[in-house]
Image (cartoon, grey):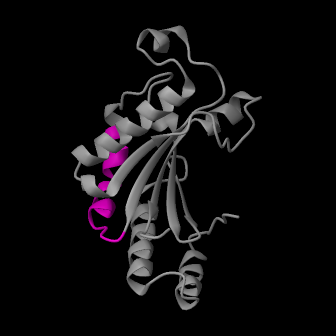
Amino acid sequence: MPFTLTRRAAPAALAALLLAGCVSERRYDELQRAYTQLQGQYNADQATIQMLEGRLKVTMNDRILFPSGGYQITESARRELAKMVPTLQGLTQTRVIVEGYTDSQPVGPELRRMGITSNLDLSSRRADTVADTLIRLGTPRAIISADGRGDANPIASNATPEGRAQNRRIEVTLVGPGN
C-alpha cells in the first residue's frame, strides 16, 4: 500500500530504503534531489508531492492546467509546468510518466464536437498535452511517456462536486528502472 511522506520524514524513509537494499545509492540521490527541488517549486494549492515506495509523484489538479472541459494548456499552466523542467532535465536513471484522470461525468457536447467521445479520450489528450509541453520546455523526450486513465482510480467520491474536482488531475510520476 502506498504511503505519503512529509517533507521531514522523506529523507529518513529514503535512507531506510537505501539501507534495505531496495534502492541504489545513485537512485536514492536522484529521487532525494528531485523531491527537494520540487518541494521548493510548488505551494500545496498548486501540487501535492509525495514519495511513494521509491517513486516520486507530483499531482496537479486539472484547474491549474486546463480550462474547464478542455485539454489545451493555458499560459499560466505552461509556467507551472516549467517549474518542473530543471528537475526533470537532470534525471538519468528515471522515467517520467504523465497520467491523466477525470471524474465520472460524461463528456459534454462541445468535447464530442472536437472528437473526444469519452473520459478516457479526454484524459489521454490531457496527459499527452502535458507530456508534449514538458518536452517542448526541455525535458528529454526519451524519459517521458503519457497515459490516459479516464475515471479509473478515483481518489475521492464522484458523488460530490468537491470529490469530482479532486479526481480531475494530472499525476507526474518519477520511477527508476525496474520499478
Q: Is residue 44 magenta?
A: no
Q: Position of residue 149 (x, y in %)?
A: 55, 39
Q: Does the magenta stretch include residue 85?
A: yes
Identify the residue at image location x=26%, y=62%.
89
Q: Which of 157 and 63 is in front in this view?
A: 157
40 up-or-down from 54: above or below: above
Identify the residue at image location x=38%, y=75%.
30
Magenta segment range?
77-93
58 up-or-down from 65: above or below: below
Q: How many labels does the image show?
A: 0
Q: Say whether residue 150 is left or right of residue 127.
A: right
Q: Nearer the viewer, residue 94 or 79?
A: 94
Q: Position of residue 20 (x, y in %)?
A: 58, 89
33 up-or-down from 73: above or below: below
Identify the residue at image location x=30%, y=49%.
82
Q: Say whether residue 151 is left or right of residue 92.
A: right
